[in-house]
Amino acid sequence: MVHALRETDPGRFEGLLSTIVIIFAYIQFCIPIRQKALLTVYFVVLWILHIAGHIGYLIGFIHKENYYGIGVFIAWIIASTLYMSGLIYYRVIRGKFHNVQIRNKHFFHFISQLEIILAIYISIYGISHLETISRSSVAFFLLFDFFTGDYDRFHGLLIKAVLHIFVATVTASVVLEFVSVSVESHGYEYASIIADVVSFYFFIWFIFLQFNRRNFKQEPRHGQGNAPPLGTSHTTTLGRIMPRPAYTRTARTETQKL
């Protein structure tokens, strides 16, 4: 915003840093905090930090009378507020926890993907005369690995459709950005930004859906489903259910009776 108002040359890697750091704001839905008061404060603080940047850009576009930018960042502010409100509703009010499994291996894979993306984007951010527009698309691209690991557990058409549309809009945003950098066309740039905003709304929708257990396949409970009744079978070391052999009297038992 400051560079836009003063018409100075912005730093080359400021946008890249914010693009990487923002991913941790998006995965706040799985924060392992159980105290409701502390959890509410956490969500509100992250919302303030996130919304402050949007408001700054909004003020800058209002000063420049850029109505397209004003509309885009109003949409960002509404989406960020919706995300924060939904997290408070599901995590604090209803006491629900995330059903998408976030494991340590996802973070290590995230680091390996980040190295590849940095190798691509540093060359673009290093060109001073280009104005890079990546905001959330790179962060969403890195989040794919967190979500696709549970794809087989998804139940129902809605959550799968939302995830597919989310992936499609993120991919479109990244492709359009590279095209805009190549041909230096504002049309592709505007389309990339719109796809970026739309993908955030589908991301929010997906996060809200994953809080509902009905959108995941129910695992059979112990003693139910395919499990045999107690005392009628036993499991071998290979995991196969074998019938329990019938009880037979032994010679020792017959001798005791005599």
Image (spheres, grey):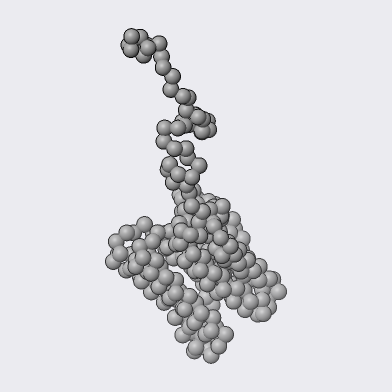
Q: Is residue 100 visible?
A: yes
Residue at image coords 37%, 69%:
88
Front position in the image: 251 or 162: 251
Q: Provide residue 192's location: percent of width, then percent of height.
A: 62, 74
Q: Provide residue 90's location: percent of width, then percent of height.
A: 39, 66
Residue at image coords 44%, 71%:
83
Residue 91 is drawn in which quadrant? bottom left
Residue 174 is drawn in which quadrant? bottom right
Q: Is 250 rendered above or below residue 118?
A: above
Q: Is 75 rendered above or below residue 125?
A: below
| Number of dots carrying numbers | 0
Residue at image coords 58%, 62%:
157
Q: Provide residue 42's location: percent of width, then percent of height.
A: 34, 66
Front position in the image: 52 or 16: 52
Q: Is residue 24 visible?
A: no
Q: Provide residue 224's location: percent of width, then percent of height.
A: 45, 44
In screen coordinates, is 10 left or right of 165? left
Looking at the image, which residue sits at the far front?
258
